[in-house]
Image (tube, rainbow, N blue to C red):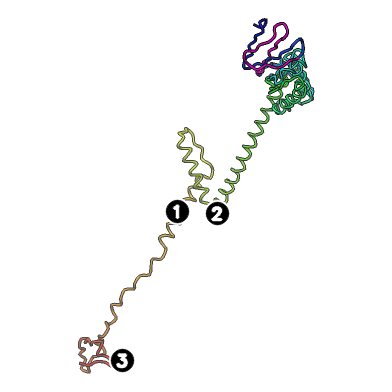
Amino acid sequence: MARLGVAVVRQYERGVVFRLGKLHNVRDPGMRFMIPLVDHLMKVSLRTVTMPIPSQQIITQDNVSIGVAAVAYYRRVDPVRSIIEIENVESAVGQFAQTTVRNMVGRSSLDQVLSNTEALNEAIKRVLDVTTERWGVLVQLVELKDIELPQSMQRAMAKQAEAEREKRAKIIAAEGEALSVGKLAQAADVIARSPVALQLRNLQVLSEIAVEKNSTIVFPAQFFESIRSAMEFHSHEEAVRVTSPLPDAVAPADLTAPAEGVIPAEELAPANGVAPAATAVPADTQRDGEMAVP
């Protein structure tokens, strides 16, 4: 159809028309007509291109040889410049990306390559953009996808990671021991204030040992002393409870004292020696210092 002067430009393409070898215009998607043998149409894809960057051995700033593979994503944003400014844009971008990765990784240490990968990717992208902009190409993304370390370096890093884990484990164990020491100090204060508590603790330990169904139980030397102390403490508590005074009780009445208002018979004895019985006198008829006579 191009010989007939008709060309079809797809949606993701742009058509650059050269008339008699000179840039004429850029055609949009659709069916486009040209002058046969005079116009020449070159189609340019505007889709994003995935370009793998093969693995290469690179020596880092701290003299460690590593293998690095990457991938770059780019697209043409200016169809005219991508044709006029450079002959083969795909090959140019690929070669330039490979050398840029080697230079940027070589300026970094191994720790930076492993820990700051995102920053390194962004730095490589900025360097590529400066040059590819003249070619009408936009680099969208660069990623380091594979980093190969020497076997000796892998073993060294594994040992370092193991040492770091052991360090954290020891720190956690030390913190737990510090808390345990604090609790033991509190328990020691309690036992110091109550010596019997230590003896009771010994008895508790022995009971726990007995539950384990061991064939042999070793009693400590102070076992019987502990039992005797506990028994003495219990006896002392019982004695204190028994000898403690009861609440004040009402004293019983004196049965030998005369009741109120009764005159003893001895005081009423006549001269003839016959003692009449005691006579009850109402209390309300008596006056102080007087005695009622029947």
Q: Is residue 75 left or right of residue 227?
A: right
Mark 1 vs mark 2, foreground winner is: 2
| Magenta span dominant secondary structure | strand
Q: Are marks 3 and 2 in contact (CB under 8 Å)?
A: no
Q: Which residue is mark 3?
A: 288
* Viewer-side label of 1, 3: 3
Q: Which residues are magenta?
A: 23-47
Mark pair 3, 2: CA separation = 66 Å
Q: Quarter of the image holding residue 141?
A: top right
| Residue 76 tag number | none
Q: Is residue 181 above or below residue 86?
A: below
* Left or right position of 289 against 2: left
Asked which secondary structure carries label 1, the reply is helix
Question: Quick one: 275 or 94, which is closer to the camera?
Answer: 94
The amino acid sitting under disc 3 is: Asp
- Residue 12 highlighted magenta (yes or no): no
SS at badge 3: loop
Identity of the residue drawn at 51% across and 40% down: 219
Question: Which quadrant would the N terminus be assigned to in this image?
Answer: top right
Would you name the residue on which mark 1 appears? 234
> For residue 294, what is the image quadrant?
bottom left
- For mark 1, does the 10 Å Cα neighbourhood hold few (<14), some (14 to 19), or many (20 or more) residues? few
